[in-house]
Image: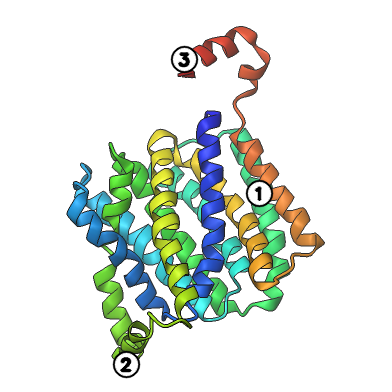
Amino acid sequence: MPPRDQFRALLVAVVWGLNFPATTIALEHFPPMLMVALRFILVAVPALVFVPRPRVPLRWLLGVGLGIGLLQFAFLYVGIAAGMPSGLASLVLQASAPFTVLLGGLWLRERLSRRQGIGIAVAVLGLAVIAVHRAQVAALLPVLLTLCGALGWAFGNVCSRQARAPKPLHLTLWMSIVPPVPMLVLSLLFEGPHRIADSLRTSLTLEALPSVLGLLYIVVIATGVGYGIWNILLSRHPSSVVAPFSMLVPVVGVLSSWLFFDELPDLVELVAGVAVVGGVLYASRPPRVLLENPVVAVTHSSRTSP
């Protein structure tokens, strides 16, 4: 992956890391299933009006919407509403990276290099250390719900890779048409019409303002900007190369949760976070031959420079 795309992947990690405290704040007012529906309604309506349908097979459009849109966020939001701390949620959801690599290998026959394998293993080890340490303060059910969200994200990643959309941002916007209807039905069944009506009726009050701003951040920045860049990267590179960058998200998530909610990370989490960052950076380095062979390096540079 060239440096420009590495920077874009890092930017996505920051955007998605800040998404977790924004989600926690938004869920203080909106019930979780309704919030999933609102999130994607606010994206789907302008997409249907102003954005042409992406030229991808319908099955992959539905697959991306089902995995990334519906399954990931339904399980994640319900998990956070059930008591999952935002910092821990940002960590556990990154199980999507090894899930994506596993699905890519089984489904797409993508081969994992030795360097990528070592880097991902180090990053996963760092994630496991943080998970074991933080799981002491979280119930089991919210963790399992968030893991289900991670599996949904991985499924959506592989579908996005298979879609190979000529304009990935169009795919990002159009996949938002999938979650609203089923999530509204689920919200009516499990959250009830009274709770839905009450949250919508009071959404313009001063007390609801932080939650509304959190929802807008999720819609505009996390969805529009974050997934737009992410799908561009997946269209250019194998999912096994792109997915490890998502392991940087919990670093931002833990730090931002510390700033917003005073969830202070301790030494164990900081050391494990360094392992996550180091593993991702190691996995994304170019092959050693390009660094040691000047002729090959110059040839490679001349082919990739603008």
Amino acid beneath label 1: Ala
Mark 1 and mark 2: span between their CA atoms? 44 Å
Return the residue nearer the eye: 88 or 15: 15
Residue drawn at 53 percent across, 10 percent down: 299
For residue 251, side relative to residue 270 (left or right): left
Q: Is residue 181 above or below residue 174?
A: below
For residue 39, side relative to residue 77 (left or right): left
Q: Residue furthest bottom?
A: 194
Q: Secondary structure at mark 1?
A: helix
Mark 3 and mark 1: span between their CA atoms? 31 Å
Of badges 3 and 1, the one in the foreground is 3
Do callouts 3 and 1 mark residues in contact (Cβ within 8 Å)?
Answer: no
- Which sits earlier in the primary sequence, circle 3 or circle 2? 2
Q: Which residue is mark 2?
A: 194
Amino acid beneath label 2: His
Q: Is residue 296 above or below residue 205?
A: above
Q: Secondary structure at mark 2?
A: helix
Residue 265 spot, x, y in % from top left:
74, 65
Of badges 1 and 2, the one in the foreground is 2
For residue 243, side relative to residue 268 (left or right): left
Residue drawn at 76 percent across, 57 percent down: 270
